[in-house]
């Protein structure tokens, strides 16, 4: 039997309509999902946290508690970016520890941790803290292809992950570039070399995902990530119903309860229709894009890049920038293109083309990366380019967070006028500007001015 993790209320709407599903919609669905028989429901983390406060004026912690309240039978899962938590910089170990503690206290069962560079030193604290507070820890390896990302590389990584104390392992194919043949080879090798349960997470962007899942299931994958249709496919995960139907009556049957799936379907349809109507869900998101297999660019990164080029009035350079991405990636030692590396490599490729000279200008993040502040690159970076950007500067070789002093108490003091609990401090630590605005409004509500429509000129 293959187990299923339902992703529609996290990755599904993050991939298809910029993470705008409201807490009310999420809770309504989770109440039904709780009876479907999933292994877990992915409900939190990734972009949901920022989006709650930034666009919906909602408290992400309250969402988690509300979901927990209606999910009595099913485990709740979140996505956690190692030492970055859900933000974009490295946080000190005590902040990572507090975030794991509060996530579990507020209702999370499984924390899926990953690091963009697969540098296990950046995962260590999150794993230790998750276990310490009684959570289940899954480590995700960021999947990509390159001359260094061989099956042997992933097998060695899996062995390290097992040693680190993870409860399960996930192949996180954020760009949807894993092919059926490679999935068979990779999962067969991983099954031989680790006892950990293996989960596969991919996206339908390139049009091959269901075939890849099928190959993975036959090779012995234990869990797959799917999304309830019609909130599925395109840049999101394969359809939950389609995968369950395809394996019905076989030894892999996930045995989902269709009575409850049919109860959820009209609600999902209504939600999807709402976001199509308000323009946030573009039909383009459902079009198959085979070119990502060549450029390895995740959907979110493409839309970012298109926006940067449009803002500069340089959309005519689009193809040129696309061709530059694999070159920048090679110069940087083949980092997998996942947040924050996807944005960094994307922006650098845009700069290289628009300036007409490679690395004439660099974002601060690329300099930090070359200084070793994000961890170890999968392959060595290009020495000549490194020299051009950071000269003979010293490069960090230790675990980057070892250089950070504990900061939680300091943050607590800093935000004492805005924050009313440790959860608020964490929201502020991760997204200072957004959380300041949100919490100030939350705790000092302004009475709404009543307006009545009338014609002044009668
Ligand atoms: Co994903």
Image (cartoon, rainbow, N blue to C red):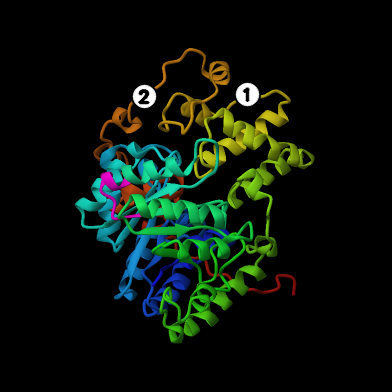
Residue 131 is left or right of residue 313, and the answer is left
- In the image, 191 versus 449, the foreground residue is 191
Residue 207: in magenta span: no
Q: Which residue is mark 1?
A: 359
Kindly tell me whether residue 19 is visible in this rendering: no
Of tags 2 and 1, which is closer to the observer? 2
| Residue closest to the far bottom | 259
- In the image, 180 versus 105, the foreground residue is 180
Helix, strand or loop for disc 2: loop
What percent of the width, then of the height, locates residue 205?
62, 58
Q: Is residue 223 above or below residue 311?
A: below
Q: Quadrant of residue 254?
A: bottom left
What percent of the width, then of the height, locates residue 140?
40, 50
Q: Residue at x 58, y 20 (%)?
A: 385
Q: Is residue 38 above or below residue 189?
A: below
Q: Residue at x 32, y 42 (%)?
A: 160
Quadrant for the C terminus, please.
bottom right
Report the disc number at residue 397. 2
The magenta segment is: 161-169
Q: Residue at x 54, y 75 (%)?
A: 242
Residue 163: in magenta span: yes
What percent of the width, then of the height, locates residue 369?
47, 29
Point out the tag, 2 or 1, that comes first from the N-terminus: 1
What percent of the width, then of the height, locates residue 354?
72, 31
């Amino acid at each position: 039997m293959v187990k299923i993790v339902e992703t529609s209320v996290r990755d599904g709407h993050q991939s298809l309509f910029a993470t705008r599903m409201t807490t009310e919609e999420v809770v309504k669905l989770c109440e039904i999902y709780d009876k479907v028989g999933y292994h877990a429901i992915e409900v939190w983390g990734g972009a949901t946290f920022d989006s709650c406060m930034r666009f919906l004026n909602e408290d992400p912690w309250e969402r988690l508690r509300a979901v927990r309240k209606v999910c009595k039978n099913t485990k709740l899962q979140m996505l956690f970016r190692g030492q970055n938590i859900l933000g974009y910089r490295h946080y000190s170990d005590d902040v990572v520890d507090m975030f794991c503690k509060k996530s579990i206290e507020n209702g999370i069962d499984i924390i899926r941790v990953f690091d963009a560079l697969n540098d296990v030193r950046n995962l260590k604290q999150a794993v230790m803290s998750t276990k310490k507070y009684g959570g289940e820890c899954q480590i995700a390896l960021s999947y990509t292809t390159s001359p260094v990302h061989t099956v042997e590389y992933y097998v060695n990584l899996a062995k390290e992950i097992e040693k680190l104390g993870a409860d399960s392992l996930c192949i996180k194919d954020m760009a949807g570039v894993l092919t059926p043949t490679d999935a068979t080879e990779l999962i067969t090798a991983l099954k031989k070399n680790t006892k950990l349960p293996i989960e596969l997470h991919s996206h339908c962007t390139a049009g091959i995902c269901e075939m890849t899942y099928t190959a993975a299931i036959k090779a012995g994958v234990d869990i797959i990530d799917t999304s309830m249709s019609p909130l599925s496919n395109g840049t999101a995960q394969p359809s939950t119903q389609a995968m369950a139907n395809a394996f019905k009556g076989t030894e892999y049957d996930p045995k989902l309860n269709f009575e409850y799936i049919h109860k959820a379907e009209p609600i999902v349809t209504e939600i999807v229709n709402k976001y199509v109507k308000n323009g946030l869900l573009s039909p383009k998101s459902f079009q198959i894009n085979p070119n990502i297999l060549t450029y390895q660019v995740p959907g979110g990164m493409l839309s970012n890049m298109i926006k940067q080029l449009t803002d500069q009035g340089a959309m005519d350079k689009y193809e040129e920038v696309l061709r530059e991405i694999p070159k920048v990636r090679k110069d940087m030692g083949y980092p997998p293109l996942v947040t924050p590396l996807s944005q960094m490599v994307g922006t650098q490729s845009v700069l290289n083309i628009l300036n007409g000279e490679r690395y004439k200008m660099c974002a601060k993040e690329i300099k930090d990366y070359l200084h070793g502040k994000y961890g170890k690159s999968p392959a060595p970076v290009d020495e000549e380019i490194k020299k051009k950007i950071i000269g003979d500067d010293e490069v960090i070789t230790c675990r980057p967070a070892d250089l950070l002093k504990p900061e939680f108490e300091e943050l607590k003091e800093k935000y004492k006028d805005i924050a009313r609990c440790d959860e608020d401090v964490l929201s502020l630590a991760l997204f200072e500007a957004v959380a300041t605005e949100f919490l100030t409004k939350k705790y000092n509500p302004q009475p709404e001015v009543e307006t009545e429509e009338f014609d002044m000129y009668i």
